[in-house]
Image (cartoon, rainbow, N blue to C red):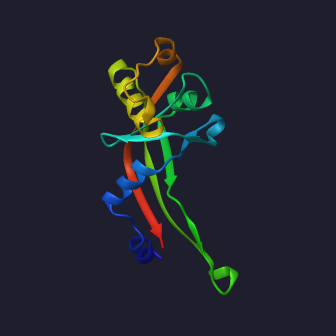
Amino acid sequence: MQERMREHQLSEAQTAALLRAAEVGHLGTVGAGGFPYVTPVHFVLLEGRIYIHGLAKGTRLQNLRENPRVCFETAGPHSYLQAETPCDTNTAYQSVIVLGTATVVEAREKKIRALEALVAKYTPQHVGKTFPENMLKMTAVVEITFLEVTGKYYA
């Protein structure tokens, strides 16, 4: 089993490419009572870290403040590999799992830089526009620092 796992590893460049291209990720935090709490997020890879944004209040941020350890997952498009028997049917995919620590970005310039990168990725028609002050106050930006990254594929 271990050999097969190594055989299906994405390279560092492929892993970074998937992190740049994927549209939705899933952020897992440690929630109340130690239960996992997973939310879908828009994200951007910037300077070797993942940045997400959202409301400045809520369960996700409360969880992060109490325990900064996170798991982040994203996957590329997939397709089904049909076979003669149901047990041999499989899925072609690429995925990345990041174990890391998350912190809320407090520095205004860093927060704006991350938001600009998110705008460039998701709504490039708005690149160069300024962020209203009330929006900056209501928005939290979270930075995920990588402790371990695993990229896998099956084709």
Residue furthest to the right? 86
Q: Depth check: 6 or 121 in front?
A: 121
Residue 6 shown left or right of residue 84 in the figure: left
- Is 87 situated above or below 97? below
Write down the quadrant of residue 130 in the picture: top left
Q: Depth check: 155 or 144 in front?
A: 155
Report the number of discs: 0
Task: Residue 110: give x, y in percent of width and height.
Answer: 34, 25
Q: Depth check: 41 or 123 in front?
A: 123
Residue 11 shown left or right of residue 121 in the figure: left
Task: Residue 30: give x, y in percent of width and height.
Answer: 57, 39
- Is 22 situated above or below 134? below
Task: Residue 44: give x, y in percent of width and height.
Answer: 42, 40
Q: Depth check: 125 or 152 in front?
A: 125
- Is 138 situated above or below 42? above
- Is 98 situated above or below 151? above
Residue furthest to the front? 125
